[in-house]
Image (spheres, helix red, strand yellow):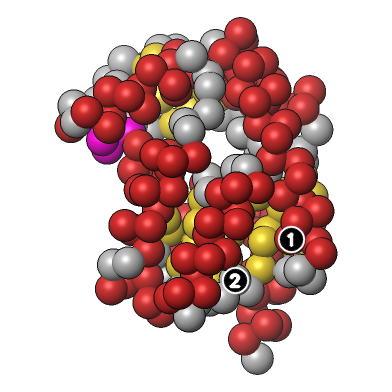
Amino acid sequence: MQVIMLGLPGAGKGTQATRIAEAFHVPHISTGDMFRAAIGAGTPLGLEVKGYLDAGRLVPDSLTIQVVKERLGQSDARTGFVLDGFPRTLPQAEALEDLLRELDLPLQYALYIHVPRTVLMARLTGRRLCRNCGATYHIVFQPPKHEGRCDRCGGPLYQRSDDSEEAVKTRLEQYAQTEPLVEFYRKRGILRQIDGERAPEAVYADIESLLTASRS
């Protein structure tokens, strides 16, 4: 199973990708997670990426493609994968197509989780993370039991710099260039649009039904 997730920030790509990976026993490959790991390690790549993310800007194609190519070459991706956060531009999509042709791992589906931008703004600016364990909350949709404190470990909650209102506006504007990807994969006959305004369980039910049917 080779699947990619499409959608604007906050649409729920990561949540759904994690569930797909667990249910179908394939790796969840997230460029965002790989970038954050590089930032945490303080590598030159991580420092370069941090500058883009803090400003709410997209990481350049050359850096992103380098990271993804290395990851897809690992042994666990030979049985399939769920790509989350890549591709985001047409050059990335074309580079991915060439890479997967080399690896003989053709894409099965491009799952496009569609959510209106006004909804995404409310979702993203209200997100809070635990500084200790990384647990995620939302001040409206999933608030902690005690304001500013994690339910799991009691650690302090914080707002990521790229979740501020100005950064979110910039991110949504930057990610507008992902819209041509919808047509790119529609022309290839593998695009499937999912209504992402619903509860995560309802969104996943549609995805699971689609992927299960394709394997039968």
Disc tally is 2
Q: Is residue 197 visible?
A: yes
Provide residue 85's location: percent of width, then percent of height: 53, 45
Residue at the spot 33% in from the left edge and 34% down from the top edge:
36
Mark 2 falls on what kind of element?
loop
Mark 1 falls on what kind of element?
helix
Q: In the picture, which quadrant includes the C terminus?
A: bottom right
Q: Name the residue tied to disc 2.
A: 107
Q: Which of marks 1 and 2 precedes in the sequence?
A: 2
Foreground of the two, 128 or 86 = 86
Q: Is residue 160 left or right of residue 84?
A: left
Residue 185's label in the rendered image is 1
Q: Which residues are magenta?
A: 36-40
* Kind of residue at badge 1: Tyr
Foreground of the two, 120 or 58 = 58
Q: Is residue 149 left or right of residue 8?
A: left
